[in-house]
Amino acid sequence: MTLQTKWRIAGGIAIAGSVVLAYGGRHWDFPRQSLTHFMVYWLIFFVFFVTALLLAVWDLRHIRAQYRVDERELFRQTLGEEDFRKRLRDAERRAREHGKGR
């Protein structure tokens, strides 16, 4: 299991926890028993919610970074190879020469 899979699971748990707590805030009596219960309850909700958001942002940044790495590797495999660039220059030169000969 990759690290990305683990933090996605953690993000799913955080989202599920915040959904359950948001639902429970309306239907359960526990948060209304005292001001302390209210504050602790919604603090836990807030921690779940912020954790889910931060993990989502972290995942997006990781996806972007991985895209850049893969893009760079693809460039090295194609245009980065000297043989390919030589053949491309030769083809461009032949196209220019063929165009002038008309």
Image: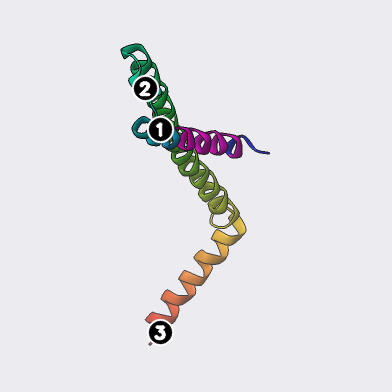
Secondary structure, mark 1, is helix
Q: Main secondary structure of the magenta part?
A: helix
* Viewer-closest of 5 and 93: 5
Mark closer to the chain start, 2 or 3: 2
Q: How far apart in space, not on screen, are marks 3 and 1 (Cα)?
A: 80 Å
Q: Report if the CB atoms under discs 2 and 1 are less than 8 Å apart.
A: yes
Kind of residue indicated by mark 1 = Gly
Q: How far apart in space, not on screen, are marks 2 and 3 (Cα)?
A: 86 Å
Kind of residue indicated by mark 2 = Pro
Q: Residue furthest bottom?
A: 102
Q: Residue at x 44, y 81 (%)?
A: 98
Location of residue 85 (image quadrant): bottom right
Give the quadrant of the N terminus: top right
Q: Is residue 27 magenta?
A: no
Residue annotated with mark 2: 31
In the displayed structure, 102 sits above or below 26; it is below
Classed neighbour count for the residue bearing mark 2: other residues with Cα under 10 Å, few (<14), some (14–19), many (≥20):
some
Kind of residue indicated by mark 3 = Gly
Q: How far apart in space, not on screen, are marks 2 and 1 (Cα)?
A: 9 Å
Q: Residue at x 34, y 16 (%)?
A: 39
Q: Horizontal and vertical percent for residue 79?
A: 53, 56
Residue 101 tag number: 3
Q: Report if the CB atoms under discs 2 and 3 are less than 8 Å apart.
A: no
Residue 64 tag number: none
Mark closer to the chain start, 2 or 1: 1
Q: Horizontal and vertical percent for residue 62?
A: 49, 38
Q: Horizontal and vertical percent for residue 26?
A: 34, 33
| Type of colouring | rainbow
